[in-house]
Image: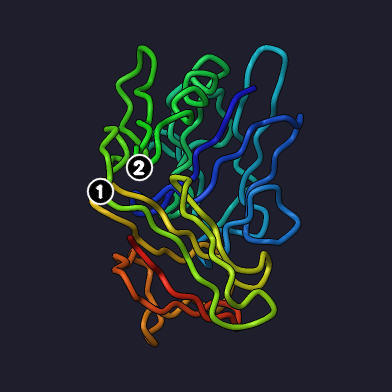
Amino acid sequence: MPKLIVSIDGVVIKELQLTKDRTALGRRPYNDIVIDNLAISGEHAVLHMHPSGVEVEDLESTNGTYVNGKAVQRQWLHGGDVIELGKYKIRFLDENEAEDYAKTMVFKPGMVPPILPARNRATPLVASPLTQAVPLEHSANIRVLSGSAAGRDVPLTKVVTTIGKPGVAVAAITRRQHGYVLAHVEGPDTPTHNGVHIGTEPVPLHHGDVLELAGTEMQFLQT
C-alpha cells in the first residue's frame, strides 16, 4: 500500500498507510490526518486512491495545496512527491517505496533508518536529519511523574514517539542524528519544557529535562 510521511520543520511526526479510497486532511478532528494549525483549513485536501494510482485534490482551502512547490487543484501523485500544507510536508511513497521504507524500520537499537530518495525524480527529502543511519551513543526513555501512570517508563525505541491525548494535546519526540527533539503536533495546549511552553520549532532534549503535556508531567532520561 502507498504511504504518507508527515513532517514539520524537518521532524517526522506521523506515518500513515493509505488503505482507504478517500483520505481526508484538515484541521477538523474528523479528518483522517488532523493538522491542528490555523493555516490549515477545516477540510483542506483529500487523497483519492484509484486502481491506477493516487491523486490529491484541494478542497478550496484558504491557503492552498502544493505539490513539489506548485499550487494544485487536483493532481496525480508520483513516488517521492511532497505535498505541502502550510509548514507541513507530506511525502508520498508509492507501493514499492513504501515496501522499501518499511524494510528500513528493522534496524539495530540506536540506529536511525534513512528516508529513501525518490525513484527517478529529483524531489527534495522531507526530513533531511534522517537521511543517514547514524548510531546514537545512548538510549533514552520518558518517565511519567504524575497521574495514574506515575512511575512508568516509556522506552524511546522508535524514530518518532508520540505522547499526549489525541484531540487535546499531542507532541512528538523524534530521534535525530545527534540526539532527541520535542515538537508540538496538535491541540491548543503546547507542551512545556522545563516549565516553558515550546514554540513552533523543535526543542533539543537533555537528560533530566521535565516535560508537561495535557496535565501529565514527565521526565526525559538518557543513559
Task: Give the crowd class for mark 1: few <14, some 14-19, many >=20 residues within 10 Å.
Answer: few
**Secondary element at tag 2:** loop
Say which mark, if any, is on residue 137. Answer: 1
Residue occupying the point 31% across, 32% down: 124
The residue under label 2 is which amino acid type?
Answer: Gly
The residue under label 1 is which amino acid type?
Answer: Glu
Task: Give the crowd class for mark 2: few <14, some 14-19, many >=20 residues within 10 Å.
Answer: many
Residue 125 in picture, x, y percent from top left: 33, 34
Left/right placement of residue 136 relative to residue 64 reads: left
Q: Quadrant of the N terminus?
A: top right
The number of discs equals 2
Q: Quadrant of the C terminus?
A: bottom left
Residue occupying the point 48% across, 45% down: 158
- Give the colour scheme of this rendering: rainbow
Tell which of 145 and 67 is nearer to you: 145
Q: Is residue 41 above or below residue 127?
A: below
Residue 218 in picture, x, y percent from top left: 49, 76
Residue ID for mark 2: 110
- Does the residue at mark 2 contact the one at mark 1 (Cβ under 8 Å)? yes
Residue 192 in picture, x, y percent from top left: 43, 80
Residue occupying the point 69% across, 61% down: 28
Q: Earlier in the sequence, mark 2 or mark 1?
A: 2
**Secondary element at tag 1:** loop
